[in-house]
Amino acid sequence: MPTLLKFLLVCLLLATAGSVQAQTPTAPSPAPATAQPAYDVNAATQAYLNTLTPAQKARSDAYFEGGYWLLLVEMLYAVGVAAVFLGLGLSRRIKAWTERLPQRFLRTLAYVAIYLLLAWVLSFPLTVYVGYFREHHYGLSNQSFGEWLGESLTSLALSVVFGSLLILALYAAVRRAGRTWWVWGAGIMGTFVAVGIFLGPVFISPLFNKSTPLPAGPVRAAILSMARANGVPADNVYLVDASRQSKRISANVSGIGSTIRVSLNDNLLRRCTPQEVQAVMGHELGHYVLNHIYELLLSFVMVIGTGFWLLDWMFVRLVARFGSRWGVADRADVGGLPLAVALLAVLTFLSTPIVNTIVRTNELEADVFGLNAARQPDGFAAIAMKLSEYRKIDPTPLEEALFFDHPSGHTRVYTAMRWKAEHLGDK
Ligand SMILES: [Zn+2]
């Protein structure tokens, strides 16, 4: 997927994940006064980690560590795509075609739409490797090539329509505000993403998956009881048929205002015990109750504002030097879009540890909330182990800080076992 489109989708997905240490919910947890047998948290953690066979661990590490390199490869690939547009003259030709249109906003819109389509085509080899072949190689996908391609084309259509409108709005800001466009740009991005999150569960997700109210039964009763205890409306809990795409277990919080909801997927329901499902749903209720969507949206606006400011700084210097060779006049010239996208790809690559840490902090908060809400430390630890299918279980602290947007399995199991040790005497 071309970098810009992927960036937009990631922005939307980020908002379905989950920020600030100060809000960490802490249940009052006085150490039990009664004498407890000594509980070795580290030994209990290691016992869970040992349930993974060396072969399973090697496979999980290989999949996840490959993702580190993909960050670099995708950034370099995006720079390569920009080189095709600018260095080989593709951009000049698109501009020549669109120049015949009568109004400037039509010329801009046409250039952007053609650019998005061609960038998708040029990026297809990498997209198909990452999204289809690699997922199948690791046994993580349930989709045939046709199904996968159909979904990719749906994403492309969405991105061309909404991406063109977004970029048109950004160029309007550049042309009106000049060098301070990045302030307006951050506001436009924030508004666009907020609308996207609002519409997401109602208009975007249904294009890919079906979501239905959770079927009646003991699992539903336990989840709804936990939802009520934490002030989450019961009619906001949904079941999603994610097994159409993969066997990954997952759940999330999505939407804003009237569309906000907690969803769990059918893989989770089928592959996990009721205790494990409760542990996951306690975590998701944490995202909901702690307003993580709103917090992430605010963080996103600050990150993108800084990113746009840096992008402008680099863009102006590069265009002063190479502008005539690339056919780019100034920042208001839409022919500079491939360069702007390449610079955004570089900045996105460099900001990976910052964005990961913002998201991972929220996730840790939701973990702690979930342990207090569901009181299923072993269920939570078992889930953390199951997630090793696609997330390295035991990274170094530096690796976790740089590359993890969720706490590692080790961190999660340890957090759960420490909770268990400190609450063994509670009832
Ligand atoms: Zn989460």
Image (cartoon, rainbow, N blue to C red):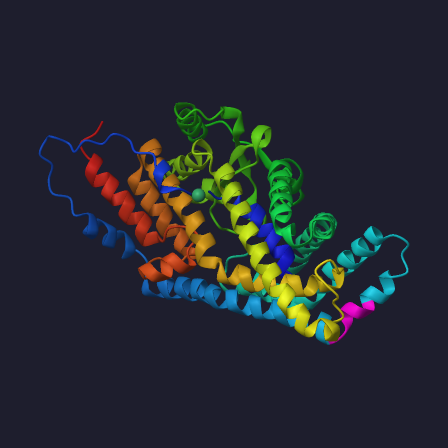
* x and y percentages locating residue 405 in the rendered image: 44, 52
* x and y percentages locating residue 34 in the rendered image: 10, 30
Residue 395 in view of the camera:
no
Q: Which residues are magenta?
A: 88-93
Residue 114 in view of the camera:
yes
Q: Residue at x 57, y 30 (%)?
A: 257
Q: Residue at x 79, y 59 (%)?
A: 111
Q: Quadrant of residue 336?
A: bottom right
From this viewpoint, which residue is outermost toward the left?
A: 35
Q: Main secondary structure of the magenta part?
A: helix
Q: Quadrant of residue 322?
A: bottom right
**Figure check: 161 above or below 318:** above
Q: Is residue 89 magenta?
A: yes
Q: Residue at x 60, y 51 (%)?
A: 9
Image quadrant where one finds the C terminus: top left
* x and y percentages locating residue 371 in the rendered image: 32, 37
* x and y percentages locating residue 269 in the rendered image: 46, 40
